[in-house]
Image (tube, coloured by chain):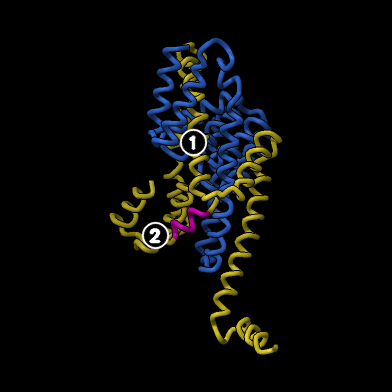
Amino acid sequence: MLSMVEKAVVDQKKWIPNDEFWDMIVVVQSLPGVFAVNTALYVGQRVAGTRGAFAAMLGAIIPSITIILLLATVFREYRDQPVVERIFKGIRPCVVALILAPSLRMIKSAKVTWKTAIIPIATVFLIWRCKISPAYVILAAIAGSLIYALVINRRETVRRETRDEDSPVFRVQKHKEAEP
Amino acid sequence: MIYLQLLWVFVKIGVLGFGGGYAMLSLIQHEVVDHYGWMTMTDFADMVAISQMTPGPISINLATYVGYTTAGFGGSLLASFALCLPSVIMVYLILKLFMSKRNNALMDNTLKGLKPAIAGLIFAAGLSMMNLQNFPDFGRGQYNISVIICVFAFVASYFFKANPILLIVMSGIVGFVFY
C-alpha cells in the first residue's frame, strides 16, 4: 500500500518531497490507529490543510465501508444456506492459522530472547486465560516500554557526555579520578 | 445508548491500537465478543475472513460490520468514524507541534519494547478463536478436517508466506467438499 501512496503523492503529484515523505511515514507508523487513515490524514493536512485531511481520510475509508455494507447485507441473506455454512466451516480454522502465523513471525522479528520471552507469554496468558482486557495489557506494556526507553536514552546521553570534555558529567568524573 | 457504546468502544480501540490491524483484532475481539456480546466467536471468525479477502484496512472493515449488525447503517458510519477520531486529533497535533528528534528516538525505543507484547496480543486473539464453534469436528470421528486445515494454513503462512486470500479460498473449497 505504501508504495502506491508514494507513487501517487511523491512521484506523480509532487505534493511532498521524497525525504520529507519518508521521515513523516516513520512518525505516522508509530502512531496508534489505522495506518492507512493516519497516512491519508498526514498527506491531506500537509497538502491542503484541515479540509484536505478530512477529504483524504474519507477517501481512505469510504471504499471499505461501501464494500463491507454491501457484503454484510448479502451475507445476512445467505449465511444460513447450508452451502455457505459448509464453506465457512472450512474457512474458520484457516482464519485462526492466519492470525497465529504473523504473531509468531512478529515475535521472531522483535528478537525476543529467552529472558524477554516472558513478555509475550504473560500477555497471552493474561488475555487468553484470565480474560483481562487487552486495553489494560497495552497500557501496562506502554508504561514498561517507556521506562525502558527512558533508561536507554539516559544511558546514551551519559555515554555521549562523558566523551565531551566540557560536559558536567565529564568534569565530575575527572574530579573523582583526581581525588585519590 | 448503543450509539454511545459503539463510540466509546471504537474510540478506545483507535487510541490503543498500536501495531496495525492485527493488533487491533485482539481489542475488537475482547470488546465485541467477550464484553458486549454483539457477536459470537464464529461471527468474528467469519468477519475476519471477509475482511482479509476484501481490500482496505481490516479494522475499518470490522468497525463497519460491527456497527452495521448492532445499529444499522448509522451505526456502521459511527463506528468507522469513531475509530478514526483519535488519529485525526493525533496527526493534527503532530503536524502542528512538530516532533523533535529526541522525542522521536524515545518513541522509537518505546515501540521496540512494545512489539513483543503486541505479538502476544495477536497470538491470544488467535488462541481465543480455537473453540468448538470454530473447530466443530474436534475430538469427533477419525478425521479432524478443521485441525488439518488449520495446521496446513499455518505451515503455508508461517514458512512459505502463502497468500492469505488463496488460503481462505482453498479452505472454503475444502469445507464445501468435506462437510
Residue picked out by circle 1? A101
Label 1 crowd bin: few (<14), some (14–19), many (20+), radius 10 Å: many
Chain ID of residue with mark 1: A
Which amino acid type is shown beneath numbered disc 2? Answer: Phe
Which SS does the magenta portion mostly show? helix
1 or 2: mark nearer the eye: 1
On screen, residue A91 versus residue B12, left or right, reads left
SS type, badge 2 = helix
Chain in yellow in the render: A
Residue A21 — which label? 2
Amino acid at pointer 1: Ala
**Percent coordinates x, y for residue A109 in the rendering:** 48, 48
The answer to whether residue B47 is above or below residue A133 is above
Please give the chain letter of the residue carrying mark 2: A
The quarter of the image holding the N terminus of chain B is top right
The range drawn in magenta is: A24-30
Q: Alpha carbon of mark 1 to alpha carbon of mark 2: how far?
A: 31 Å
Estimate the x, y position of residue A119 in percent, counting from the top left: 63, 47
Q: Position of residue A112 (x, y in %)?
A: 55, 49
Mark closest to the chain's N terminus, 1 or 2: 2
Q: The chain shown in blue is which?
A: B
